[in-house]
Image (spheres, rainbow, N blue to C red):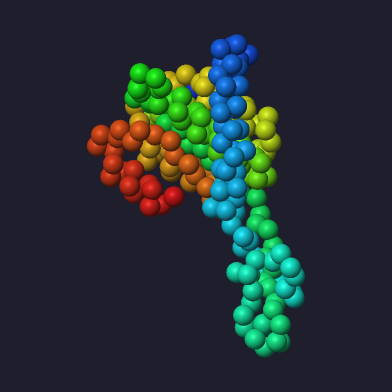
Amino acid sequence: MIRSWRKQVAEPPTEPASKEILGRVRRIELRARGLVDSRFSGEYHSVFKGQGIEFAEVREYQPGDEVRTIDWNVTARLGHPYVKRYVEERELTILLVVDLSGSQQWGTRGRLKSELVAEVAATLALSATRNNDRVALLLVSDRVEWFVPPRKGRRHALRLIRDLLAVRPVGQGTDLAGALDYAGRLFRSRSVVFLFSDFILGDGWDAFGKSLSRT
């Protein structure tokens, strides 16, 4: 099935976004920014960027340095504290893969699954751009519905939210195995994939598990 996906991409939302869509984008942005401004952005950096991946040098300890960065071997050898310094990581590419299949339009009385997904995806997109990472969007059902290549910046993050709300899927089924295989061909290094779905896969669990192990 995956070979036919490229030929099945839905038509892009070429018309200007409606006032309703723009209003929803704005409301979602405000809620997401509240999360980003409170704790999530720092936690994002801690989890996905870490302290550094490339060792740069050892230098003398200075007031304010974290104790955990002390190089105890060098400190013992030279008689006073030294710390390890790391080079900040290269930028990441964050890929948001969103399942648009028919079951996503269900939910509780107060909120659809798709609305919750849009809010969480917006929080991730804004956190990524705040950390100078690139964000891409892949909307899927039983085919690729829409793809937005990775870029940086707040305007790009808002564009992703708009497209997530505006695209109307052609397919109604779910093929997450195909989605992961497709995503794996798009990005091969320094990328993190977030998959949003209710995981109602029927007999597709075996194929999904195999694709997950390859991604």
Q: Is residue 24 above or below residue 48?
A: above
Please indicate, yes or no, whether residue 138 appears anywhere in the rendered image.
no
Question: Which corner quadrant of the image does residue 153 belong to?
Answer: top right
Which quadrant would residue 141 be assigned to in this image? top left
Quadrant where the image shows the N terminus: top left
Horizontal and vertical percent position of residue 169: 44, 21
Q: Residue at x 52, y 34 (%)?
A: 121
Could you tell me if residue 128 is visible in this image?
Answer: yes
| Number of numbered tags placed on the structure image | 0
In percent of width and height, residue 16 lies at 63, 14
- Relative image position of residue 36 (x, y in whole percent): 59, 38
Task: Describe residue 161's horizontal placement relative to residue 171 as left or right.
Answer: right
Q: Residue 176 lies in what quarter of the image?
A: top left
Q: Nearer the viewer, residue 99 or 142?
A: 99
Q: Image point 64% across, 74% down: which residue?
A: 70
Q: Farthest left residue? A: 203
Residue at 71% x, 64% y: name it: 64
**Nearer to me, 106 or 39:** 39
Residue nearer the viewer, 98 or 178: 98
- Tell which residue pokes out farthest to the front in this image: 63
The one of 43 and 138 positioned closer to us in this rendering: 43
Find residue 7 and report its horizontal and vertical position in percent. Answer: 48, 28
Residue 186 shown left or right of residue 142 in the figure: right
At 56% from the left edge and 43% from the top edge, which residue is drawn? 40
Give the farthest residue toward the top: 19
| Vertical comparison of 74 with 176: above or below | below
Q: Is residue 146 above or below residue 50?
A: above
